Image (cartoon, grey):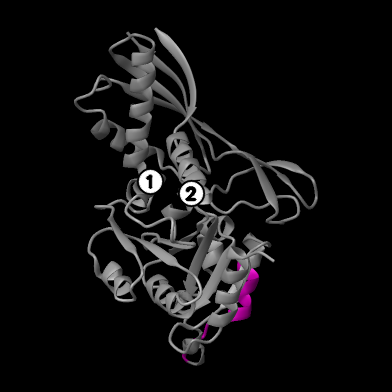
Amino acid sequence: MKIKVVSRVLEANERIAEENRKLLKDKGVFVLNLMSAPGAGKTSLLIKTIELLKSRVAIGVIEGDITGTEDAERIGALRVPVVQINTGGACHLDANMINTVLQELPLDQIRLLFIENVGNLVCPAEFNVGEDMKVMILSVTEGEDKPLKYPLMFQESQVLLINKIDLLPYLDIDIERLVKNSLKVNPQLKIFTVSCKSGEGLSQWTDFLLSKINPV
Amino acid sequence: MHELSIAHNIIEIAISECKKAGYSKINSISIRIGRASGVMTDALLFAFDIAKKDSIAENAVLKYEETPVKGRCRECGTDSTVDDTIFVCCPSCGSYQFELLSGRELDIIEIDVE
């Protein structure tokens, strides 16, 4: 007996992502999905961003890692609500993982929620989790060819933060070419160049975030 | 990279459809994989055989058809089928403003049950 199905395999994830989005929108929470390769500086950027914004806006964090709680402890030290998800091997966060931890956060108080995805330049881009905005970080040590080699994350993101620009004097990277390559695969991409070490460029980024939470 | 969770999703959907129709065994599941979906067919077939164990789909075969990557260029307006499955641009003018019309799907189309 044959049964016609015609169902998208990832439909379940999309459905839950939509549920998350609705719940968070009702609570008035603006949600960012932070993605990058391992070591590009997601957690450092989060820490800097929290330090700059926490007196002005209530922030919450969901930390995604394959294993361990180091990142959640670093964030928790800043006294913002944080939940750690250990994916136990999975290479990305999915909507259901987010759904199961949302109740652990004081959503009535939070205005800005950061979801730090698992460090991976490929898979996280394929799974919506209910975010308002996908933000990716690329560090200058990764090279100007990455948009051309891993285009999907660049295409899915609305914002690209080029991090570690304090290292530029020591590297051969052509940052103009990196920007050009990024815009080639996604002309709508909003790009910030920052250094979490020196603090350069971070205020432009946090101003942008504030404008998103409190649209004029 | 996440073929195992995709295999679990496929089996979950198939089992639910099978039960909904009042049957208790799945013989085969037919899916459509877009060539630009990012799914590696070999890895998916491997993961499927692991994921189906101890379920009503344990003897099921995964049948698949691949769909080509087709799109329309927003700059020159040409419709094309492209070979590149990762980095898709317009073969006529080279623009990356190439809107995909097909090639990223990952759909279950039919299950065979008894």
- Callout 2 amino acid: Gly
Relative vertical location of residue B44 with respect to residue A201 in this rendering, above or below: above
State whether the magenta stretch is mostly helix, strand or loop: helix
The residue depicted at 47 percent of the width and 89 percent of the height is A198
User: Are labels 1 and 2 on one chain?
Assistant: yes
**Residue A210 at x, y percent in the picture:** 58, 70
Q: Are marks 1 and 2 in contact (CB under 8 Å)?
A: yes
Q: Secondary structure at mark 1?
A: helix
Residue A108 occupies quadrant = bottom left
- Whether the magenta-drawn stretch holds residue B1 is answered as no
| Chain for disc number 2 | A
Relative vertical location of residue B54 with respect to residue B43 in this rendering, above or below: above
| Chain for disc number 1 | A
Q: Secondary structure at mark 2?
A: loop
Point out the stretch of residues depicted in magenta: A170-182
**Residue A56 at x, y percent in the picture:** 51, 75
- Tell which of B108 and A135 is nearer to you: A135
Q: Which mark is residue A130?
A: 2
Which of marks 2 and 1 precedes in the sequence?
1
Q: Which mark is residue A99?
A: 1
Relative vertical location of residue A24 with respect to residue A163 in this rendering, above or below: above
Left or right position of A19 against B73: left
Left or right position of A117 against A154: left
Quadrant in which the N terminus of chain A is drawn: top left
Specify whether residue A174 is in view. Answer: no
